[in-house]
Amino acid sequence: MSVTAHETDEELPAWSLSTAAGAGANLPATWPERVTRDWAWGGVTGAGVRVCVLDSGVELDHPLIGEVQRSIAVTKQGDTVTIEDDDSGDLCGHGTACAGVIRSIAPDCELTSVRVLGSGYTGSGAAMLAGLRWAIEEGFHVINMSLSTTKKQYVDQLHELADRAYFRRTMLIASAHNMPVESFPWRFASVVSVGSHEDDDPYAYYYNPHPPVEFFAHGLNVEVAWLGGATLRCTGNSFATPHIAGISALVLGKHPELTPFQLKSVLHLTSTNVGEVE
């Protein structure tokens, strides 16, 4: 709860909380003594959770993905960026792979594809920013972003968008770069950053006590959906990231009241290497 000085006491600084307002800001404590996976997502399938795949598009009739609620294309021609509904599907397979992983974990979530990459995994920073901005304004619960940029001129705008998502209760889940380089937005503290581990279990994920990468998920030799209704074995942080996005969709399906920082806490407490997994 945020209360400005103008709304309470003119002598208080901006964004302060008066005693009277604080007394009315009590929140119920509904968390159990120990957070388990059963408490976090037992018995749910992601129904009611809106997930955005910001990528290269999604093949709309892939049998491992099913219905895609909406498909958007973000394109740049000269200085003009256009956002419009699109039925072209996926231009290189990457987005389809990520969407398939999410569906395998949260089969009943609502999927929207926002295509910002073209064939050959090419794209512009302007299209990426516009697509992310659109997704945040649409109010998705989870945005999977298995891509990043090393271009410093986009960092400030990306940081602003990542913070906007965080405060609007949208969880941005971003893959770490596959090379040891500095890229964004995964390095921002307001996102969930994901690297890979080599375990086969799609529900095995590890909290990293030495950020900036916060979590490791199944990302080596992953069987993913691919173009033409096919599957492919792929390796990379890109394919670890949607595992965490899918699990986040499960958690939010059972606990829609959770804020991004609370969701991070649940992911931490239910990690394979933290406490006892049930």
Image (cartoon, rainbow, N blue to C red):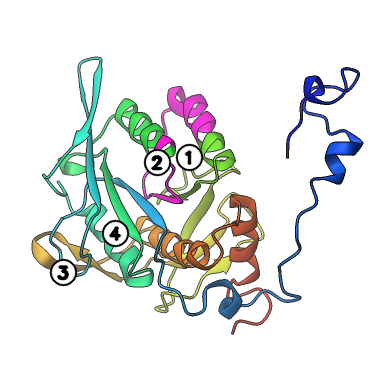
Give the residue type at disc 2. Answer: Ser
In the rendered structure, which disc, 4 or 3, sits on the residue that comes first in sequence?
3
Residue beneath the point at 82% across and 30% down: 16
Q: Give the SS element for disc 3.
A: loop
Residue 24 shown left or right of residue 37 in the figure: right
Name the quadrant containing residue 34.
bottom right
Please name whichever residue, 203 or 17, is drawn nearer the observer in this view of the structure.
17
Q: What stretch is highlighted in magenta?
A: 137-161
Looking at the figure, which quarter contains the C terminus?
bottom right
Q: Mark 4 points at which residue?
A: 99
Are there few (<14), some (14-19), or many (20+) residues within 10 Å of tag 3? few
- Residue at image position (29%, 46%) is 55
Residue 125, given in percent of the width and then of the height, sits at 34, 28
The tally of labels here is 4
Which residue corresponds to mark 1?
185
* Residue type, numbered disc 1: Pro
Quadrant where the image shows the N terminus: top right
Q: Left or right: 178 with respect to 111?
A: right
Nearer the N terminus, badge 3 or badge 1? 3
Q: Where does the image place residue 30, in percent across and percent down from the top left? A: 71, 67
Q: Position of residue 199 (x, y in %)?
A: 44, 76
Contact between marks 1 and 4 (CB within 8 A): the answer is no
Contact between labelled residues 1 and 2, with CB atoms less than 8 Å apart:
yes
Q: How far apart are marks 1 and 4 (CA)?
A: 20 Å
Mark closer to the observer (1, 4): 4
